[in-house]
Each structure stands twice: as structure tokens, then as C-alpha cells.
Image: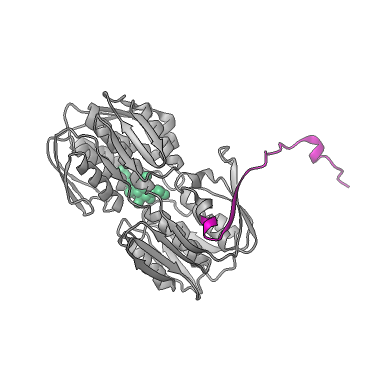
Amino acid sequence: MDGLSSEHFTINGGRRLHGELALSGAKNSALKLMAASLLADELSVIRRVPRITDVFTMVEMLRALGAEVAFERGELRINPGAPLNDCAPYELVRTMRASIIVMGPMVARNGHARIALPGGCNIGPRRIDFHLRGLEQLGAHVAIDHGFIDVSSDGLHGAVVPLDYPSVGATENLLMAATAAAGETVIENAAREPEIVDLARFLTAMGATIEGAGTSSIHVEGGRSLHGAEHEVIADRIEAGTYLIAAAACAGDVTVHGLDAVHLELFLTKLRAMGVGIDEGDRSIRARRDRGLRPVDISTLPHPGFPTDLQAQVMVLLSLAAGASIVTENVFENRFVVVDELNRLGAGITTSGHHAVVAGPRRLAGTVVEAPDLRGGAALVIAGLAAEGATEVRAIHHIDRGYEQLEEKLSALGASIVRAADAAPRPPSADRVSGEVR
Ligand code: EPZ
């Protein structure tokens, strides 16, 4: 137990999910849009922001940097105002490694940023070398001392910045820094995720000149200061995929609203190959399952490949398929952490390096499990929904980082899921462990 987890979900499985739900704004866009708002010294308004822990952490980060922030009913009003404070506190960076995304905007605005080195997390070391090397190519000086990154510049300049790997965070940090770099910047081998396109749209509304977002080559004409803007966050495609998998795992019929199906193209192709009925409507996707599931092999890749953020969840579905599937995790070093807990629910998954063999079909049976991280926690919830009997998913603070109103949305689809406080742990005491040994 990590001491943070004070609540758990109790799920009674075996119920069919059916109905419709409206998706929240994308966590992995909202956090970057919040950082981008630092590039202007006036008010920006961001709508459809999910009320999740990571957003609350980023609100604290923006306030620590000196911005005025108000967050009500999904609408963020951010006014960075006077020059920013130039140090991002360790406690906040430790809490959420995505905080590193304020580095680009801070260097662009202040010419300086001092940020605690983000720790790894349990899905991998989460390096930031591509971020730092790119900033150096834009003219910044980078030093690391006493656990802090110190980035300074007396004026960024445009450059061609090739990325060794299409890193989402590095693309975003460099895209934001490039808006302040005099001249043209070209980010080569850029990430192509829909959240990058959403960020570029917001930056363009702020006055930036950007072409090619969503492709591997992004061109930025930088050097002008930016102004405030208004923007609505795109829908969360990972939340969408999570609910569609849950529907298929519970022989259900669920429609999610608010996103372009093209954001999940390969994922939907894989669900269809498994035998899940998928209908794409106008900004909606319907998944229904009324037959057996077929095994399929899946390899996670940068967008438009199969999203790594849906890997843990889809392994639950593969556990119900009539045959073995191979899942290959190509994005993170250690993203099979939840496998042991899934196997305690009755899955039959064996891992070797980046590969997992998912045996099926397996009958899942409820028990007590502990969420290891955000997406592993979501996978455990899906497994509990599909399992026979009751499942208790502990450490759900991990899940609250990225899913808005999870239990409310699932209950509205017919699931039996309630949130409750953990019983206070009773320290072992003499009287309880006494007793005679004959
Ligand atoms: C973003 O993380 C997302 N997080 C992740 O979602 C997502 O899994 C990931 O992109 C891939 O799509 C946010 O947007 C807040 P990367 P990020 O830089 O930016 C290595 C979730 O569950 N790398 O594309 O950290 C890195 O170690 C989260 O919502 C370097 O080696 O992803 C990793 O193995 C989890 N050096 C791989 O690249 C670098 O400088 C992908 O990282 C940067 C990254």
C-alpha cells in the first residue's frame, strides 16, 4: 500500500452494460493546453476540462508559477499576468511527471526554467533527453544539478529539430518553445497524436504560425509574443476506448459521444477483428457484443498505431476470447505491471520482456485487487465488471487521475459499482496474535 489510497471501488460483476455517455475532455490535451496558456500574459479560457486529479495538480503548478487560475464547471480561466516565477516545485513535479510540459513555455516566456527532474514511474524511467536536446538546438543552455534541470536562454532561435523517437511530450514542449524562437523551426519525426493537433489549434488561436501538426513534420514561424485565446478540449479518446472495451467485455451495447472515430481508427479495427460490432456515427461510436470473441495480436505504437494507453484494458477483453493472443508493448519499458493482479482475477497472462501471451477464454472471478497505475486500474475495473461475483479495486486514487466520474458513468450504463473508504488498517497487536500453539 502506498499510503495514499484511502478509497476503493466495490463492483458486482456479470451485468450487461447498455446506454450512451458523453465523453469528457482529453486529459492528455488539457494538461498541455494549460501549460500553453503560460505563453501569453493575458487571460485564456479553456472549456471541457475534465475534473480529474492531474488537472487539479496542474492548476497548482500554474499557481506556483504565478498565474491566476479559476476552475468552475469544466471551464478554466488562466491569467499568467506578470513574468512567471521560474521554478517549478519538486513536490508537484514528483506528483505528476507531465508537469515537465511547463518547461517549454517557461523558457519561452522567462528565458529561464528551473524544474525538478521528473522521477520515473512504474511504467518506465520516462526519460526527457529528447526534450532537453531539442531545447539546446533552439539555442537554450541546459544544466542538471542537485536534481533540478536548469534551462536558460537569452533568445531562442529557429532550427531543424529531428526527434530520435516521436515523443508526445518532447513534440509538445518543443512546439511551445518554438513559438518564441525567432525564425523557422521544423520538428522532424514529430508525434502525430490528436492531442498535438489540439495543442497546435490553441497555439494558433493565440497568434502562433504553425503548419503540419498531426504529421511527422511540424513547421513553426516563431518570435512573436502570443495573446490569450479561448478553446474547447477535444474529447478523450482513451476514455472512449476504455468504455468501448468495457461494453464488449460485458456483452453490452454502449455508444460514446463527442469524438471523431478517426482518432481510434486502428483500435476500432482490432475490436471488429475480435468480433465486436462497431458503428461509427457523427462524432459517436457504438460498440455491441452479442457473440463470442476471437483472439487477435496487438502491438502498441505511436499514433496512429494502437494506443499504449489502451493496452492494459484490451488484455482483459482478450482474456475472454476463444484462443491465445500476443500483446507487444513497444512504447514503454514496463507496462505489464497490472498482469499479476489480472491473473488473480482469473486471467491467464504470461509476460516475457515486451511480449504478453493472453490465454483465453478465461472465466474471471471477483476478488480484492490493487490498482498499480492509471490505466492498469481501469483494466481492473473492466475485469471486475466482467467477473463473476464481487471485486474490490483498491488504490483508486490512481484511477481518479484520469477518469472523470467513472463510477457515475458506469452506473448509468447499468454497472454495479460503488466508491467507499477503506477500513482503517488495524495494526497487529499482541492480543490479536496471541493464542496457543498446541
Ligand atoms: C504521453 O506521455 C501521455 N501522457 C501518455 O499517457 C502516453 O502513454 C504517451 O504520451 C504515449 O502516447 C500525457 O500526455 C500526459 P512519450 P509522454 O514522450 O509524453 C521515451 C496516460 O496513461 N522517451 O511519447 O511521456 C519514454 O521513456 C499516460 O494517460 C525518451 O526516451 O510519452 C517512453 O518510453 C501514460 N526520451 C516513450 O519515449 C524522451 O525525452 C514514449 O514517451 C521522451 C520520451
Where residue 110 sits, quadrant-wise, is: top left
Q: Residue furthest right?
A: 438
Q: Is residue 344 in view?
A: yes
Any part of residue 356 in sight: no
The percent coordinates of residue 145 (x first, y second) are 34, 27
- Could you say where residue 159 lies in the image, as x and y percent from the top left? 14, 40
> What residue sits 25% from the left and 50% below the top?
197
In terms of depth relative to the viewer, which is nearer, 369 or 32? 32
Vertical comparison of 429 with 123: above or below: above
Pick the quarter of the image with the N terminus: top right
Q: Position of residue 350 (x, y in %)?
A: 51, 62
Query: Horizontal and vertical percent for residue 74?
Result: 40, 42
Left or right: residue 323 compared with residue 264: right
Q: Residue at x 37, y 66 (%)?
A: 268
Residue 122 in magenta stretch = no
Q: Out of 407 and 20, give the one closest to the viewer.
A: 20
Q: Residue at x 33, y 60 (%)?
A: 283
* Residue extending farthest bottom: 291
Compared with 33, 415 (above or below) is below
In this picture, residue 406 sits left or right of residue 152: right
Return the residue found at the far left: 183
107 lies left or right of 14: left
Determine the image quadrant of residue 35: top left
Query: What residue range appears in magenta?
Result: 410-438
Verify whether residue 434 appears in magenta.
Answer: yes
Identify which residue is drawn at 41% across, 54% down.
23
